[in-house]
Image (spheres, rainbow, N blue to C red):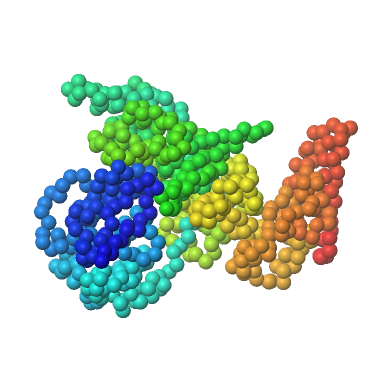
């Protein structure tokens, strides 16, 4: 009787499936010529016995993806040439067993289908076990069946991630039948519980910290400076790229000036730019400079949209759209989410600002130059938005002396996967990272008082800020709320437009969120919209603690006096309980021109008067600070003095001024007599 198993994989909709596994005819392992991956046209991409499994046909964007069984190598990079040396009998046996274990994982694992990232995680564990087996000169099955060897191997794991990966993989194989699936009994039955306990004993993973406001402003300013610098010389730079590409196509004997990049830089007026940016005056340097500006554009897009790295990386060339309305232009970036399900790529949109739109425009100019060298023109296609990526790989220029790998059967160009922390971007990272000062550390302590920031070597005073791209997402969600949390005027100006746009589209009940995000719970969890909403109570709680609970000056107004009385009694405020109250919607806070407001829900006074002076008269939710009230009075006085006294506007603004002055008088009377009544 035939027992057929199909591969349980996350693969694109039009991909060709690998072979079905007929266990009844093959036994415990498929044959060596068993096809584990196929191109879309049905041609085999890899078979079971291949040392490198080509997973590129199953990537939704056509990116090169490989599963590498060369566990004796330090990296898992794809190698396009045959093995340089014959494998020993022990090594051949270990590789064969690793390939069988991967087949078991793909075909017989219980539960959800496997993504490429899940496969690479499992293979990374199998590679470590392969290294251990070869070092101790034992077979792979002997290792897996020995509780002593497994325990010794696991004792060397010193991180939570490593222990978790091993425990997870052991759990998968323990769920299989020792006789009909594995062919032997695993030796990890008792060890598995120990590993689970070790995982729980590790400290909880630390959340990615948002950038302090000064650091945030400095990084955004530095990104803008990089864009400005390139914008000035972009035409000359891209003209040089076209010229070098033309020289590269000339037969070797006729291109003496091919490597004389230094003189060409002077000719195109780029010498100073290359020197300032630390770019070497070589062919490789020209390509590296383009990668630099692509990284700057991607980070800027992340900063003004809240995208993840992979979402920004895979933006299509034609991603930018604009909607013009009276007095404003609204910008949107259309792309795909990082998740796809049942072979279906999910599309979505992000709101951005003119800064994000400008970064896309500059990135598109760079991409156009690369596509021209390739000999292709990006066109917009609804059926495959990822065919022409915005951040197309600079290696297509072949300035670095090697050709970009591209499977001819794939119909999408590769992207530049530029990680900010990789060595080629050391100079760029140095220009983007400000030095941490005492004020930054105090702000981090306000954000998370339970974390020992002063003892963390990555966040010590005098250290360069440890910049990671995901910080842009959390910082945007946390700070760009209307809570008064953003204190630096420069940062407030930089985020003003994006705050309005995001508040419009990502607020509760917005049409945008309903139509594009919330119809699918999985996509909603991945989108900045969820972070935006989740950050709102956190942002409000932080502002409340800073502006009210720990305020240095006396508080007035009905709600302000109530809070002041608690402080006068020495009542201690629990930060954790306060945060939970905000998250449950029991408490609220937002900054106002006069101090703050603690009303939960919609306000019935805001909008009736421009400055909200009605709140000063009889609102039970208002918190008044004399410093802010005095500042508002001064500004209002200047406005009133500039108006014609016979105009209606003058009388309206004068009424507001009088209300503010009266409120200040009441506050001063309370301060003088120590009364708790307005």
Where is residue 618 drawn, in percent x and y? 83, 57
Q: Does any portion of residue 598 appear in the rendered image?
A: no
135 vs 618, left or right, is: left
Where is residue 498 drawn, in percent x and y? 59, 43
Residue situated furthest bottom in the rendering: 190
Residue 369 sits above or below residue 543 on the image:
above
**Where is residue 579, by image quadrant?**
bottom right
Where is residue 272 drawn, in percent x and y? 38, 29
Could you tell me which residue is drawn at 85 percent across and 31 percent down? 644
Q: Does any portion of residue 642 appear in the rendered image?
A: yes
Where is residue 245 drawn, in percent x and y? 30, 26
Could you tell me which residue is drawn at 42 percent across and 39 percent down? 384
Q: Nearer the viewer, residue 337 or 533?
A: 337
Q: Quadrant of the C terminus?
A: bottom right
Residue 510 sits above or below residue 161 on the image:
above
Could you tell me which residue is drawn at 72 percent across and 57 percent down? 601
Q: Nearer the viewer, residue 56 or 591?
A: 56
Could you tell me which residue is drawn at 82 percent across and 51 percent down? 614
656 vs 119, left or right, is: right
71 vs 670, left or right, is: left
**Where is residue 63, by image quadrant?**
top left
Q: Nearer the viewer, residue 476 or 511?
A: 511
211 vs 543, left or right, is: left
Q: Nearer the viewer, residue 162 or 645?
A: 162
Residue 328 sits above or below residue 419 on the image:
above
Q: How many marks?
A: 0
């Amino acid at each position: 009787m035939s027992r057929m198993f199909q591969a349980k994989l996350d693969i694109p909709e039009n991909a060709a499936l690998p072979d079905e596994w007929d266990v009844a005819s093959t036994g415990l392992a498929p044959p060596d010529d068993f096809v584990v991956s196929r191109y879309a046209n049905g041609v085999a991409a890899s078979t079971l016995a291949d040392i490198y499994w080509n997973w590129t046909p199953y990537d939704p964007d056509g990116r090169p993806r490989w599963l590498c069984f060369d566990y004796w190598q330090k990296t898992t990079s794809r190698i396009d040439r045959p093995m340089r040396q014959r494998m020993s009998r022990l090594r051949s046996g270990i590789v064969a067993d690793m390939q069988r274990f991967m087949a078991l994982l793909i075909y017989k694992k219980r539960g959800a289908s496997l993504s490429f990232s899940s496969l690479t995680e499992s293979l990374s564990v199998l590679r470590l076990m392969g290294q251990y087996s070869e070092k101790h000169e034992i077979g792979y099955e002997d290792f897996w069946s020995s509780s002593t060897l497994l325990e010794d191997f696991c004792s060397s794991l010193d991180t939570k991630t490593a222990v978790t990966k091993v425990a997870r993989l052991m759990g998968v194989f323990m769920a299989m039948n020792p006789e009909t699936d594995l062919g032997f009994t695993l030796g990890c039955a008792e060890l598995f519980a120990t590993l689970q306990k070790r995982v729980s004993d590790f400290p909880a993973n630390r959340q990615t910290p948002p950038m302090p406001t000064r650091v945030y402003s400095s990084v955004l300013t530095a990104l803008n400076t990089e864009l400005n610098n390139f914008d000035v010389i972009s035409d000359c730079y891209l003209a040089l790229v076209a010229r070098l590409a033309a020289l590269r196509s000339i037969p070797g004997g006729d291109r003496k000036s091919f490597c004389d990049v230094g003189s060409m830089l002077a000719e195109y007026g780029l010498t100073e730019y290359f020197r300032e940016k630390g770019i070497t005056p070589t062919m490789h340097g020209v390509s590296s400079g383009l990668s630099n500006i692509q990284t700057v554009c991607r980070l800027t897009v992340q900063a003004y949209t809240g995208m993840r790295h992979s979402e920004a990386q895979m933006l299509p060339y034609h991603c930018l759209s604009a909607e013009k309305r009276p007095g404003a232009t609204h910008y949107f970036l259309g792309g795909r989410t990082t998740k796809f399900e049942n072979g279906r790529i999910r599309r979505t949109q992000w709101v951005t600002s003119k800064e994000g739109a400008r970064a896309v425009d500059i990135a598109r100019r760079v991409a156009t130059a690369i596509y021209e060298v390739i000999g292709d023109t990006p066109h917009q296609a609804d059926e495959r938005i990822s065919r022409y990526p915005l951040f197309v790989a600079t290696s297509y220029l072949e300035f670095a002396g090697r050709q970009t790998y591209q499977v001819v059967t794939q119909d999408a160009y590769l992207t530049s996967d530029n990680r900010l922390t990789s060595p080629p971007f050391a100079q760029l990272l140095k220009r983007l990272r400000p030095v941490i000062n005492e004020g930054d550390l105090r702000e981090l302590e306000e954000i998370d008082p339970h974390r020992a920031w002063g003892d963390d070597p990555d966040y010590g005073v005098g250290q360069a800020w440890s910049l990671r791209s995901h910080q842009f997402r959390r910082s945007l969600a946390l700070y760009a709320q209307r809570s008064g949390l953003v204190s630096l005027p420069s940062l407030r100006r930089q985020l003003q437009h994006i705050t309005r746009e995001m508040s419009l589209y990502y607020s509760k009940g917005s049409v945008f969120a309903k139509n594009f995000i919330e119809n699918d719970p999985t996509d909603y969890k991945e989108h900045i919209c969820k972070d935006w909403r989740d950050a709102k109570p956190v942002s409000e709680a932080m502002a409340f603690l800073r502006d009210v609970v720990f305020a240095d000056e006396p508080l007035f107004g009905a709600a302000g006096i109530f809070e002041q009385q608690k402080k006068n009694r020495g009542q201690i405020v629990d930060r954790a309980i306060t945060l939970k109250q905000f998250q449950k919607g029991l408490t609220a806070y937002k900054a106002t021109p006069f101090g703050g407001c603690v009303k939960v829900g919609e306000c019935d006074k805001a909008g009736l008067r421009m400055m909200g002076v009605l709140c000063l008269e009889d609102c039970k939710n208002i918190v008044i600070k004399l410093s802010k009230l005095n500042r508002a009075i001064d500004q209002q006085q200047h406005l009133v003095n500039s108006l014609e006294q016979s105009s209606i506007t003058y009388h309206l603004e004068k009424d507001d001024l009088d209300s503010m002055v009266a409120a200040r008088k009441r506050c001063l009377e309370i301060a003088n007599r120590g009364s708790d009544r307005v």
